[in-house]
Image (cartoon, rainbow, N blue to C red):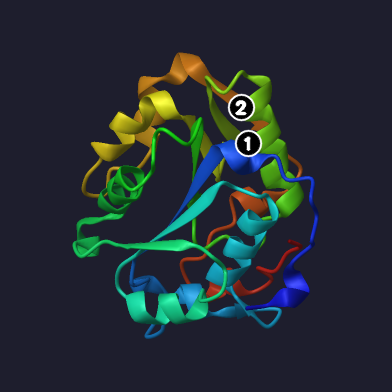
Amino acid sequence: MSDKLLTGDDDRPGKAICAIVLAAGESKRFGQSNKLFAEVVGVPILERVVVVLSNCGFGEIIVVTGADHEDTASLLDGYGVRLVRNLNWTDGMGSSLAIGAAAVDESRFAGVSVCLGDLPALETGVVLEIVRAFFDEAKSRIVVPVYEGARGHPVVFPIRVISDLKALNGDQGAKSVILKYRESVKEVAVESEGVLKDIDTRMDLEGGGGSV
């Protein structure tokens, strides 16, 4: 656990939201190793994402694992996250998101934040901006960060659409849910490309650092 990254900030408004981190793939395009364990400024990418979300004070963080479950569990030991294993992770991102959504206690949360596990430049302040926008919209709209016209992650969904997230399968991601409820989407313009800059190849990793 990288204590040096934790802010200790008590101003964390996300307790009514459950965060789901998608970390089940084997990252074939990255090479022989899993991209989520590649280090940026000495810290594995997935750990950086979990630190950012932890700093935001989400009520629970669920990490959906798959290809490297044991290594993920070892990496995140001590963070207090809940691991949910997708035994059918090869079916695609949609299946992982559905499993993560099914693990959410709907009675506890007003919303669900869906985040990719490979966003090394994601920043705490930006995620908090998205969370606050969700509350500003009375916790009833889908909130999507936008950087220079492009939509990114994490996306916050109101709990009323969780059944749609549970119904996803294959490579079908959350875009289909956003499209279904497009009239209820709130876009939030942010000033950090960290909401877009995911990692697929080793070339993507070059210069992929960021502040938490």
Query: Amino acid type of disc 2?
Result: Glu
Q: Is residue 148 visible?
A: no
The x, y position of residue 199, in whole percent, is: 52, 65
Q: Report helix, strand or loop for mark 2.
A: strand
Q: Report helix, strand or loop for mark 1.
A: strand
Q: Of marks 1 and 2, which one's residue comes earlier in the chain?
A: 1
- On screen, residue 174 versus residue 60, left or right, reads left
Task: Residue 23: name its quadrant.
Answer: bottom left
Label drawn at residue 146 = 1
Q: Is residue 58 above or below residue 43?
A: above
Task: Residue 136: name its quadrant.
Answer: top right
Residue closest to the eye, 10 or 32 = 10
Residue closest to the eye, 15 or 204 = 15
Query: Amino acid type of disc 1?
Result: Val
Check whether the beta carbons of the residues at disc 1 and disc 2 lie within 8 A of each other: yes
Residue closest to the far front:
107
Q: Which residue is mark 2?
A: 187
